[in-house]
Image (cartoon, rainbow, N blue to C red):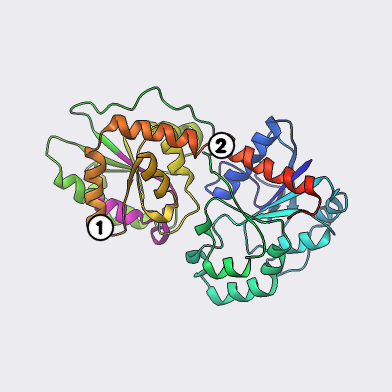
Amino acid sequence: MKIIHILSGKANPKKMNGVNVVVDRYANMMHERGCDVEVWGMTYKPHTNLPSPKYPIKFFQQYSQWSSKLDGKLLECLKKIDVDLTIVHFHGGFIRDFPRIAKKVKGLKYFVMPHGIYHEKAIAVRPYRKALYFNLIECEYVLRSKGLLVYHIDEIASKIQRKLKSIPFKILPKGPDRALSFPAKSLEIKKGEPIIWGFCGRIYNKQKNVDRIIKCFLEFSQQRPPEEKHILEIIGDGQDLSQIRKQFATAIDAGLIKIHGAKIGDEKMHLLRKMHYFIHLSSWETVPLSCIDALQLGIPLLITPETLMTNNVDRFKAGVSTTHNEKDIVADMHKLFTADRAELFKGCKKITDCVYNTKGSCDKLIEIYEEILSNGKGK
């Protein structure tokens, strides 16, 4: 079996882009298992800032989104695909190159993994343009696939689900962006030491509600006894970072809020490991990797339903689910803080063992690929 992951990008895990991280993670694991796997990156700059992973990777020139042109090197590679032994895994949606590639190879067996681009909130951005494109081009391309790969069915807007009801939806578990060793015990909160609350992600208020996290944290910390010192640490960068710095300058100067900016790799993990609680109040998501990282480090969560994790977090008692109402959020912060930390820690362990682990996700994906190749007909 030959596996080809195709994305718009370079599969660079150092970029703050979930698709890059996921593609790199899957390709790495499959390569380590001895799978014949490659990554093909469509990019506007195929000769600069290139990663050098252990798995084979190729970069092709990407042209204007509405151009009908494909890189000549890509066309040559497409001619060499053995459709009987190859699975192509497209990552992302509304990328005009993907339907063109799928049409170029007769009998191509491929899956589409939209990574949240078909979410209700995502298609609400430029809705008429996206609806026109989906109806004219994207829908046919997806319907000719062997199925949609998703982490949760709610990633797909209801109107799109109705159009695609004739193809299978394959639900994958989601693991962290790197293998993490679960701690032997929960990080102890020592008397007199600061209690660290955290967020890690893109600083984009419309989706991530970082401003609401800070407002609720400040209200919560004012309601706690004066001998407790609570600090909110924020990891990430994004279009609203400068606004956050200005809006909450007083709290930042007072040391109540710490803004770390974008961090990756060991530096990011070092900051995460110091956290006692992790907050993620997204308005839409595809199961955030940062929340899974937190769980893998034994850190309980405070999350909204839009993270698509609340059912599991509630079931395993690995944190508290909340709403977007600020009074509810503050109340649920008190609830999480006063909960038994030993029980929360056990819940984090159980949920990462049973649900959110990279091995399980990769196993399931390879199983799906093999099923398609073995039955020949593909559906």
- Percent from the top left, x then y, of residue 28? 65, 35
Q: Secondary structure at mark 2?
A: helix
Q: Secondary structure at mark 1?
A: helix
**Is residue 334 left or right of 272 when viewed as pictured?**
left
According to the picture, the residue beneath numbered tag 1 turns out to be 326
- Percent from the top left, x then y, of residue 100? 76, 63
**Is residue 239 left or right of 129 when viewed as pictured?**
left
Label 2: few (<14), some (14–19) or many (≥20) C-alpha neighbours in 10 Å: many
Residues in magenta, as a range: 197-216
Name the image quarter holding the N terminus.
Answer: top right
Q: Is residue 82 above or below residue 106?
A: above
| Mark 1 → mark 2, Cα distance in angstroms | 34 Å
The answer to whether any part of residue 250 appears in the image is no
The answer to whether any part of residue 304 appears in the image is yes
Numbered mark located on residue 358 in the image: 2
Kind of residue at badge 1? Glu
Q: Quadrant of residue 99?
A: bottom right
- Percent from the top left, x then y, of residue 231? 26, 40
Kind of residue at badge 2? Thr
Q: Is tag 1's residue or tag 2's residue first in the polypeptide sequence?
A: 1
